[in-house]
Image: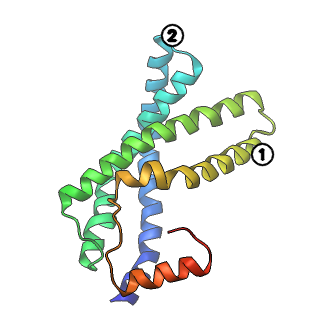
Amino acid sequence: KSDAYFEGGYWIALIGTLVSVAVYWIMLRLRILSRVREAAERKGRGRALVVFEVAAVFLMISTLLLLPWTIYTGFVREARYGLLNQSFAGWLGEQVIGLAVTLVIGSLLFVVIYAVIRRMPKNWWMVSTGVISVFLALAMLFAPVYILPLFNTYSELPQGPVRDRIVAMARVYDVPA
């Protein structure tokens, strides 16, 4: 069962890429984001707000169009292999929370990257790499404290042999517990 799950992951990655390309191609052909940008510009919004709106719409629409694939890979397949202990409603609720976080943080990242592209048209790729590196470092620093608690409930490990071994290991390495 483990081998089947692992080997199926290769096909999931390939098909997921093809599904994503198809979704983005559809969005390009329908000119959805162009229309959103033009509407935001007609309202007299500043560049940063236009980019934020277009990015938010892109993230929202792509998430909705990819939802059937996400349901299969993130819920149906995981449940089939016994790797999920949530109901569909609980799983979907976490997807909505994740989308809300992604809309805010992802759209802000788009704004910063597009500002870099505008200011440094020749070297934008180098500076953007640095921006994304700093963003990832900050995300690793702040996500466990501010984002992950939106998805998990943390509680103290109950008394028992596992806790005793962890506390003993923490003492050996002077980690406060």
Marker disc for residue 57: none
Q: Position of residue 91 (x, y in %)?
A: 26, 58
Determine whether 75 is above or below 142 in the image: below
**Residue annotated with mark 1:** 126
Rendering colour mode: rainbow
Quadrant in which residue 39 is drawn: top left
Identify which residue is drawn at 51% across, 10% down. 44
Spatial CA distance of label 1 from label 2 is 31 Å
* Local secondary structure at mark 2: loop
* Vertical order, 136 against 43 (above or below): below
* Relative side of 33 to 92, left or right: right
Q: Amino acid at mark 1?
A: Met
Label 1: few (<14), some or many (≥20) within 10 Å?
few
Work out which quarter of the rendered image holds the N terminus and state it: bottom left
Mark 2 residue crowding within 10 angstroms, few (<14) / some (14–19) / many (20+): few
Identify the disc placed on residue 44: 2
Residue 171 spot, x, y in % from top left: 56, 78
Give SS at disc 1.
Answer: helix
Residue 76 location (% of width, % of height): 25, 68
| Residue at image location 38% in from the left, 53% down from the top | 149
Of 174 and 94, nearer the camera is: 174
What kind of residue is marked 2?
A: Gly
